[in-house]
Image (spheres, rainbow, N blue to C red):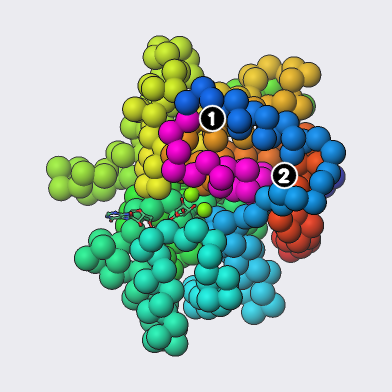
Amino acid sequence: MVDKVLLRSKFRGTLLGSLIGDCCGAPFEGQLMDSGSKLVLKKNLDTLEGPFFKAPYKKFTDDTAMTRCVANTLLDPNGFSQKLLAKNFVKEYYKDPKRGYGAAVVDVFAKLRMSKLSDPLGPAQAQFGGTGSYGNGAAMRVAPMALFCVKHEKNQLVELVQQSSSVTHTHILGINGAILQALAIKQCLLLDPRENLNKKVFLSSLKKDIKELEQVNDPDLDDNCNAYEKQLNAIEQLLDGKIDPSDENVLNMLGHNVQALYSVPTAVFCFLKCTAETLEDTDQNSFRNTLEYAISLGGDTDTIASMACAISGAYFGSTVISENLIRHCEDSEGIIKLADQLLEL
Ligand code: R7I
Ligand code: MG
Ligand code: MG
């Protein structure tokens, strides 16, 4: 049973996880991690979990900037709309453009601004010659949607995520990646971390939902018709020991780049790999292990760590997260406030 106290902690854990993964992963974005870099990472995180010091203050990137926009749009007194979300993204980007945004999404912001938001979906649809972006930008910012829909039916969450993704990402892989991330968070919000975590059941539920989403009329005409289902099968094989979960195998099978298909399933895997199935006193370490492991895979480290830690935080709640680590991240107080406001909705 998830009571209000636990739910508050889970809401905070979700958004803090998202922030912390982004802030701690950002310095390693784009790197291939050798054993030396992994040692630097470990020391780096140990220092951040130690006593508070002002500098170096861990800055967040576009992942958090856009997550805050999604949360604020949901909290708007007039309610969520695609136009308002587009406006909030544009305002945020032009206020603070140096946050490491995706190379192509900034064209969407420019067109939205130039056209005065007359067609909030047009610029995203025009990306990449009309196919839309399959980057992980819609998935990386989706956490507040899962919080908002915690008590709603699953298909309401799916619809809302489709709408919010389409403002920047209209490619089916970009949208379905965001839905997978949202569904993983929603499932974790409803699980009691004081009970055992059944990873098989967790994955089967995701697979069932993804299969429904990926159902198309004619599979022969659609290359992406079971793309995420395949990735979830790969997670299963890596978890049950059928395939050695070495970094090499994980990267080859799941990936670690900016494409949603090759990063969202990786984040789900990081959470499952680093969380024990049976209750252990190592729960305190699961969140930190998820953070460190996700970054240690290299590639799109800020985004994969952000998504993995959002899932872990949704499962465990904020009480397992080091307070020093939280305080070392930019705007952690603002993020906690947003989580509490979303809970009050
Ligand atoms: O998806 P998006 O918001 O980027 C998010 C990433 C995260 O890692 C952030 O931390 C930040 O670093 O960026 O932004 P997009 O520009 O839409 O997509 C990201 C990149 O994916 C693009 O710049 C392209 O390199 C690639 N990409 C594509 N390439 C070819 N064809 C996305 N869609 C396509 C495509 O259809
Ligand atoms: Mg980023
Ligand atoms: Mg990134």
Instruction: Tell me: 314 left or right of 83.
Output: right
Instruction: Tell me: 1 left or right of 305.
Output: right
Kindly indicate the quadrant of the structure image that contains residue 263: top left
Q: Which image quadrant: the N terminus?
A: top right
Does any atom of ligand 2 lie closer than 8 Å to the CB of label 2? no
- Helix, strand or loop under label 1: helix
User: What segment is highlighted magenta in the picture?
Assistant: 16-33
Dot 1 crowding, Cα within 10 Å, few <14, some 14–19, many 20+: some
- Helix, strand or loop under label 2: helix
Closer to us: 312 or 202: 312
Task: Give residue 302's position: percent from left, percent from top.
Answer: 54, 45
At x 38%, y 53%, the residue is 135
Mark 2 / mark 1, whichever is N-terminal: 2
At x 65%, y 68%, the residue is 72
Closer to us: 54 or 323: 54
Does any atom of ligand 3 lie closer than 8 Å to the CB of label 1? no
Query: In this orientation, does residue 36 appear?
Result: yes
- Which mark is in front, 2 or 1? 1
Instruction: Tell me: 199 left or right of 335.
Output: left
Q: Is residue 288 above or below residue 85?
A: above
Closer to us: 246 or 52: 52
What type is the residue that disc 1 sits on?
Ser
Closer to us: 116 or 58: 58
Residue 37 is tagged as 1
The mark total stands at: 2
What type is the residue that disc 2 sits on?
Gly
Q: Which residue is mark 2?
A: 13
Q: CA distance from mark 2 to mark 1?
A: 27 Å
Task: Give residue 63's position: percent from left, percent from top.
Answer: 55, 55
